[in-house]
Image (cartoon, rainbow, N blue to C red):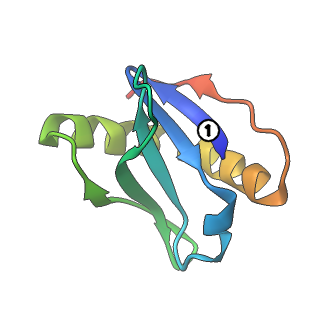
């Protein structure tokens, strides 16, 4: 599992086994939980083009909007991090803001 970025109380993660999925996406985990489980999945592209949208989520509309805005603003960085994760390279997560 490659940590891509931190946003407030969330961790954006790439899972290398997802490399064969038809669209690139990030999983969103909430910080501070004993057991980590994804609280959202967000598509970041469609047919190789930037397209950020919620695939599934247990979060509020406000949190979803914040995440989509932040991913849009940091799309290139996040996409590069996903590529590194899929190649088996170490990712360097950083704090992002919306």
Q: Residue at x 63, y 37 (%)?
A: 3
Q: Which residue is mark 1?
A: 4
25, above or below 78, in the image: below
Taking the image as shown, residue 4 lies to the left or right of residue 38, namely: right
63 shown above or below 56: above
Residue 71 visible in the current orientation: yes
Q: Quadrant of residue 87?
A: bottom right
Quadrant location, the C terminus: top left
**Secondary structure at numbered mark 1:** strand
1 relative position to 48: left or right: right
Viewer-side residue, 45 vs 11? 11
- How crowded is the residue under tag 1: few (<14 C-alpha within 10 Å), some, or many (20+)? many
Extreme-left residue of the structure = 61
Q: Can residue 74 be seen in the rendering of this structure?
A: no
- Vertical relation: 4 (above or below) 52: above
The tally of labels here is 1
Q: What residue is drawn where x is 56% and y is 44%?
A: 13
Q: Is residue 61 left or right of residue 48?
A: left
**Where's residue 18, x and y in %?**
61, 67
Give how far across and how far down residue 67 sits, in percent: 34, 39
- For image coordinates 52% across by 73% down, the residue present is 23
Image location (x, y in percent) of residue 62 = 16, 35
Residue 48, image quadrant: bottom right
Give the quarter of the image for residue 92. top right
Q: Nearer the viewer, residue 61 or 40?
A: 40
Residue 61, position as x, y percentages in the image: 14, 42
């Amino acid at each position: 599992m490659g940590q891509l970025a931190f946003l407030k109380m969330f961790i954006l993660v790439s899972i290398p086994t997802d490399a064969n999925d038809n669209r690139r996406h990030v999983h969103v985990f909430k910080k501070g939980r004993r057991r980590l489980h994804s609280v959202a999945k967000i598509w970041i592209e469609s047919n190789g083009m930037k397209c950020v949208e919620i695939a599934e989520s247990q979060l509020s509309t406000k949190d979803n909007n914040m995440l989509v805005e932040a991913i849009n603003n940091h799309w290139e960085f996040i996409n590069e991090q996903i590529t590194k994760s899929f190649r088996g390279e170490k990712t360097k997560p950083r704090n992002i803001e919306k």
